[in-house]
Structure formats: C-alpha cells, structure tokens
Image (tube, grey):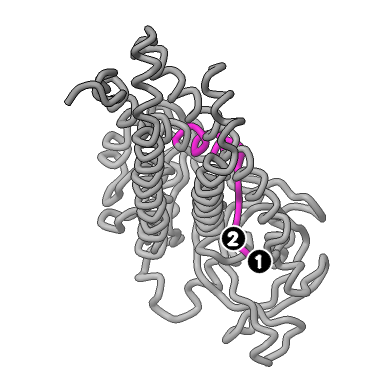
C-alpha cells in the first residue's frame, strides 16, 4: 500500500484522468439504476407495497389483472384453504378523472381505479384524511401525486364518459399502478365503473380481477387445483405480469449490463497500458529482490484506492443530480442499490487489473533492464 500511495502522489495527473473516467462511468451506472428503480416503482408500487403474498388469477390470464375475470364467490373458498390466513378481492381498471366536472381536455387526468373491500389488508395507510367506508361508497382515497394535478381533500370529480362522481376522502403515499396515480374505491362502486357496459361482466356473479392471499408456505398448485379455473402465482410473478413491466426493466438492465462490460474493458486497458509503461521499473524492483506478490499487491491497492475514490464521487454526484431533477422524473435511488452497484463496480475494477498483475509476474528483470534478449 505504501508503494501504491507514493506512486499515486507522484503521478497525480495520470491517475486523475483514470479517476475522471471511472467517476463518469459510476455516475452513469447510478443514474441508470435510479431511473430503472423509479420506473419499476411507478409501474407497480401498489403491488410492491400491498400486504399480500400470492395472487389468484383466472386460468390463462398470464398473471395480468386486465386479462383476468373471476367471481368473488371464490374468496370465501380461498380463505378456507390450507396455509391461507386471509383472502381479499381486487379489481383494476383505467379511467380519466375530470377536474371540477370539466370537459376540457387540459383538465383530464388519467388514473388507475383499484377496487378493494374497505378495511381489508389491501387498503393502504392514509397519510391525510380518512380511509374507505362501506357507508360512503363514493368516497375514494388517492395517491398524493394527484395533489400536483390540483386535486384537494374533499374534491368531487367525475369520470370521463360516465356520470359517476367520486369524492376524495383521503390521500396515500407511494401508490401508483401502470405509471398512473392509484385511486382506491370500494368494490361495489368499482363494479359500477368497470362494468358499466352491458354484458362486460360476462355474466359472472360478483366479478373481480383477482384474489389476494396472505399466508406463508402456500402451495400455488394446491390453491389452483382447489379453485376452479384459476392460476395462483406469487406477488412477484404478478408484478412481472403487468403490461410492459418486464420489457421496461429488461431494457434498463440490458443498458446497465453493457455499461458495466464496457467499463471493465476500458479500465482494464487503462491499467494495462500504465503497467506496460512501468516495465523497466518493475524489472529493477525484481532485480533487487521484490517478489511478484509484493508488486501485485501494490497494483491492486492502487486500483482499490482509485476505485473507492471514484465511486464515492460518483455517488455524491448522483445524489446531487437527483436533488435538481424535475419533480415528475421517475427517479428513485435506494441505499441498497447504491451499495450493490458500488460493490459491483469495485469488483469489476479489481478484476480488470488482474491482466496487469499477470503481466507483472511474467516480467524478466534482465530483459526489462535491457541486459538480455
């Protein structure tokens, strides 16, 4: 480590250039990871935060709410099955809210209507106002992002193309569905909205999209066999079944993968070139008794110091960037993501230096000093 630090202090400009490159790479990695996490949260935070372990869909629905339609009669059956501690119905549909009953295009806001039973484990915690009530079926609780659209507690709004009017009685936090603000409404009112068109319920009694289950060690195959014409999946599988979720996250992960691969190549080339420039120096050190282990440790120590410095600067720049990003930007940088990608970048840097380490071990002191051919 002493040798590594001495060389870093002696050749500041050379190593500064490496740090700048590494900082830019780290910065971009953290920005992409934050955007990817923000997009996935915006798409499925309602599913991610709900207190459910498994989801029952219609058979063949491919774990997608919009493709599933089953009867709520199955809820009572599901509650009686082995390892199921609680079951609750859920429905979802897209809608457009009209501010102040206006029909102006600029006053329309797309929302995700989610039907649940008031007081069930699916109802999120209210941060302002009050929760759903059976006595007030037209009262809804909405994600707080609707405040940015001008909605306030107590506001009544209509749905585009419908005479249905709903009143905001509470606000919740971090509840979005398919990139839209989630609006939680009682199941009875949701059915009026979702199946307003005659025949859209396909004649099913008490139509719902899915049944959410609570319980550990539930066997999905067992549940599916006991509930006719259903498929049971984990909550994670239900999230991946949301339209566009898997493709969206796959694109971000592919970009991150390419970026990490390119960074490994770039850093490896930098360290290799620097090592080649010091061939004669390593030859002298070997001639006076320095061992391969000592020289290899010096190189790896240099890489670790440079990498840690670059990663810390990259993290600081990322948090600084997040602070000035527009409010509507889907960016969410979590501590566990920062730690995870920091470790990945550090490992990549160390591994990329191994090519240089291998080169050191093959240096012949006599050839390096020009005494042999």
Q: Is residue 232 above or below residue 252?
A: above
Magenta-highlighted residues: 328-344
Tell me what residue is drawn at x 40 percent, y 65 percent: 66
Q: Are marks 1 and 2 in contact (CB under 8 Å)?
A: yes
For this rendering, which residue is in front, 198 or 63? 63
For this rendering, which residue is in front, 198 or 89? 89
Element carrying mark 2: loop
Name the image quarter holding the C terminus.
Answer: top left
Q: Is residue 220 above or below residue 192?
A: above
Percent x, y of residue 57: 36, 52
Tell me what residue is drawn at x 35 percent, y 52 percent: 258
For this rendering, which residue is in front, 141 or 20? 20
Q: Is residue 63 above or below residue 192?
A: above
Report whether residue 159 is seen: yes
- How packed is label 1: few (under 14 Cα within 10 Å), some, or many (20 or more)? few
Q: Which residue is mark 2?
A: 330
Q: Which residue is mark 1?
A: 328
Element carrying mark 1: loop
Magenta highlight on residue 366: no
């Amino acid at each position: 480590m002493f040798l590594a630090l001495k060389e870093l202090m002696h050749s500041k400009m050379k190593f500064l250039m490496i740090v700048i490159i590494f900082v830019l790479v780290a910065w971009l990695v953290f920005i992409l990871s934050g955007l990817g996490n923000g997009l996935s949260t915006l798409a499925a935070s309602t599913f991610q935060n709900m207190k459910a372990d498994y989801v029952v869909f219609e058979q063949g629905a491919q774990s997608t709410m919009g493709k599933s339609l089953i009867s709520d009669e199955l809820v009572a059956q599901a509650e009686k099955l082995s390892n199921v501690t609680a079951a609750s119905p859920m429905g979802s549909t897209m809608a457009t809210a009209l501010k102040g009953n206006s029909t102006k295009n600029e006053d329309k806001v797309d929302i995700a209507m989610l039907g649940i039973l008031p007081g069930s484990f699916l109802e999120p915690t209210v941060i302002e106002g009050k929760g759903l009530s059976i006595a007030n079926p037209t009262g809804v609780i909405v994600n707080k992002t609707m405040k940015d659209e001008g909605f306030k507690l107590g506001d009544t709004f209509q749905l585009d193309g419908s005479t249905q009017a709903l009143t905001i009685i509470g606000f919740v936090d971090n509840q979005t569905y398919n990139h839209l603000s989630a609006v939680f409404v009682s199941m009875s009112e949701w059915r009026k909205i979702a199946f307003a068109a005659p025949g859209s319920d396909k004649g099913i009694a008490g139509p719902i999209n899915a049944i959410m289950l609570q319980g550990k060690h539930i066997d999905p195959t067992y549940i599916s066999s006991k509930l006719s014409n259903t498929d049971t999946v984990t909550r994670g599988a239900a999230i991946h079944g949301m339209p566009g979720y898997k493709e969206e996250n796959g694109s971000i992960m592919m970009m991150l993968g390419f970026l990490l691969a390119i960074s490994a190549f770039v850093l490896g080339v930098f360290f290799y070139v620097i090592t080649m420039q010091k061939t004669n120096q390593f030859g002298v050190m070997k001639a006076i008794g320095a061992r391969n282990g000592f020289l290899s440790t010096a190189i790896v120590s240099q890489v670790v110091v440079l990498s840690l410095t670059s990663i810390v600067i990259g993290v600081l720049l990322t948090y600084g960037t997040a602070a000035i990003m527009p409010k509507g930007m889907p960016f969410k940088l979590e501590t566990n993501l920062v730690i995870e990608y920091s470790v990945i970048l550090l490992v990549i840097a160390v591994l990329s230096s191994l090519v240089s380490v291998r080169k050191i071990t093959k240096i012949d002191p006599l050839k390096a000093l020009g005494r042999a051919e």
